[in-house]
Image (tube, grey):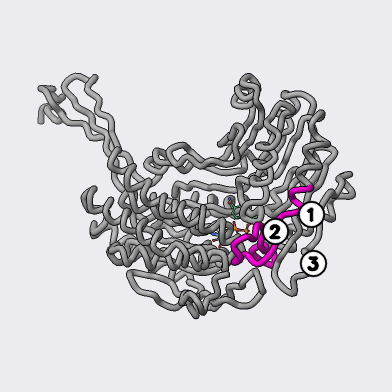
Amino acid sequence: MLAQKETGWSVPDVCLNFINGKWVGGGAQLPVINPTNETVLTHIAEASAQDVDAAVQAARESFEAGEWAGTDLETRQRLLFRIADLIDQHSDELAWLETTNIGAPIAQCRARHVPRAAYNFRFFAEYISQIRSDAYTQLENYLSVVTREPVGVAALIGPWNAPIALTSMKIAAALAFGNSCVVKPSEVSPLTAIRMVELICEAGLPAGVINLVNGSGAVTGAALAAHPEVDVLSFTGGTATGRAIMSAAGRNLTPVTLELGGKSANIIFADADFDRALDGALLSIFSNNGQQCLAGSRILVQEELADRFIEAFVERARKLRIGDPLLEDTEIGPLATKQHFERVHSFIDTLEADGCELLLGGKPCEGFESGYYYEPTIVRAPNNKAVVCQEEIFGPFATFQTFRTADEAWAIANDSKFGLLGYVWTTDYATAMAAHEHVKSGVLCINSPIIRELRAPFGGYKESGVGRESGAACEAFYSEVKTTAFLTGDVPLRKLGMGGA
Ligand code: TXE
């Protein structure tokens, strides 16, 4: 276990706001709680609407001054690569901060979340050197050239469940295309975003290009979402918050991308590779303590396989190592907040009325004096109408249903207000192709847990979101497209105002 005093790493006494290159205070101080022991880790200085305005103005001025927006490609790339290197150099510290703040097991933070953050910067550094644009010559005597310019000020509102991995994607993309930005981490989990901003400054980004405001959604987030000087807004979080943000941004015609919740079907056919499907199903729901939008939380098993598969799944889930997330071999840590812990538990009250059978868990873990530990929970539902099959629970909480035919599986999978991911396990090529055709989700993984290919769009159908994140999707979102028509030949113009006096 990495104790703070042994490592020399620390949590700031107060998390300040970073505006125009300086760490400054704010209004109310809000506590940040360690989910492992429920002690106060630190406080954030909440940015008021005026503080948010100062951050947006700093971003605007840096953008207009062109110190970053106007840099050449090599300079921009060098800086993005340097940020990635600094993240790598501080990966143990960043993983420790993330685990301490949100309770995700340290092994997962070190192996996945932090390397992903570094990779996000490398990916966009490489991407921008390959951007192409169109030229049209079909119109006689004209050459029409399409180019892209940075948009301006990007507001980047981050979630609490995987802050470094997800917020770094937004920052890397916004900066790579030459924008200035204002980052608002979740009030629950600001620590890695703050440390990342420090590293970005160490890498040499000019003052004002990146700003960070801490605070609640209701005060700081709402002020940022409604700010008229924000040119684009990218958000990852809950669907209800996404709606509020899109409405606020809509009043200013500010384009948004929203990466929201999910209730993804994980469909296991009788012909699937049993062991691989079992490993994949466990990973899909229990990674990151189940707090992931991409969780395969609705497991659908073909009838003839169901009893055997569910029994094996329950046995493995029973053996998950629950404990202090800073311990290397912990597989499940505490949920991120008390409020979220209570929300996850509240779904147990719906089981009886919906005719669901509780196979495992369903209660807070015993044996912990403190911390938001919740038992891995498995429910068998009679049909997809059950609340636990419809609502995103966002915890170590899996539901099982059975199906007979592939058509039935697609129908259950698509009977959801969400449409983020789909997972399908089969050894039959035709079934895989049929899944590709019928499952309504932004991403579909065949015989694999989530694989995030950054070149390919990530995002959801229906209430799972608006827009996508990928190299090309971010290029379209974080840059403005311009068509310039050059006259290349002799085109006589109509003469106006040639009438008599
Ligand atoms: O986070 P919120 P919540 C899902 C998951 C979870 C549910 C609720 O099911 O149980 O959403 O999450 C900021 N204007 N996901 O409510 O509110 C807030 O300060 C501007 C899915 O705890 O979505 C924080 O920075 N900003 C998910 C950010 O929004 C506002 C990740 C996210 O908080 C705001 C997290 C407002 N009016 C939860 N209100 C995913 N897609 O991965 C809040 N915020």
Residue with the mark numbered 2: 321
Can you tell which quarter of the image residue 281 is in? top right
Is 317 in the magenta?
yes
276 within the magenta span = no
Kind of element beneath mark 2: loop
Q: Would you say the magenta stretch is mainly helix, strand or loop?
A: loop
The mark found on residue 366 in the picture is 3
Q: Secondary structure at mark 3?
A: loop
Q: Are marks 2 and 3 in contact (CB under 8 Å)?
A: no
Looking at the image, tell me whether mark 1 or mark 2 is earlier in sequence order.
2
- The residue beneath circle 1 is 347
Instruction: Estimate the x, y position of residue 235 in percent, counting from the top left.
Output: 51, 52
> Is residue 27 in view from this perspective?
no
Q: Compare residues 315 and 38 and report the one nearer the observer.
A: 315
Circle nearer the viewer, 1 or 2: 2
Which part of the image, by quadrant, shows the C terminus? top left
- What quarter of the picture does the N terminus occupy? bottom right
Task: Tell me whether the residue at label 1 lies in contact with that at label 2, contact meaning CB atoms closer than 8 angstroms.
Answer: no
Identify the amino acid type marked 3: Glu
N-terminal of the pair, mark 3 or mark 1, is 1
Along the line of sight, the residue nearer the viewer: 29 or 52: 29
Give the magenta-colored segment's residue range. Answer: 315-339
Residue that appears at 71% across and 55% down:
320
Label 3 – label 1 distance at C-alpha:
19 Å
Q: Amino acid at mark 1?
A: Phe
Q: Nearer the viewer, mark 2 or mark 3?
A: 2
Measuring 52% from the left and 76% from the top, which residue is drawn there?
A: 4
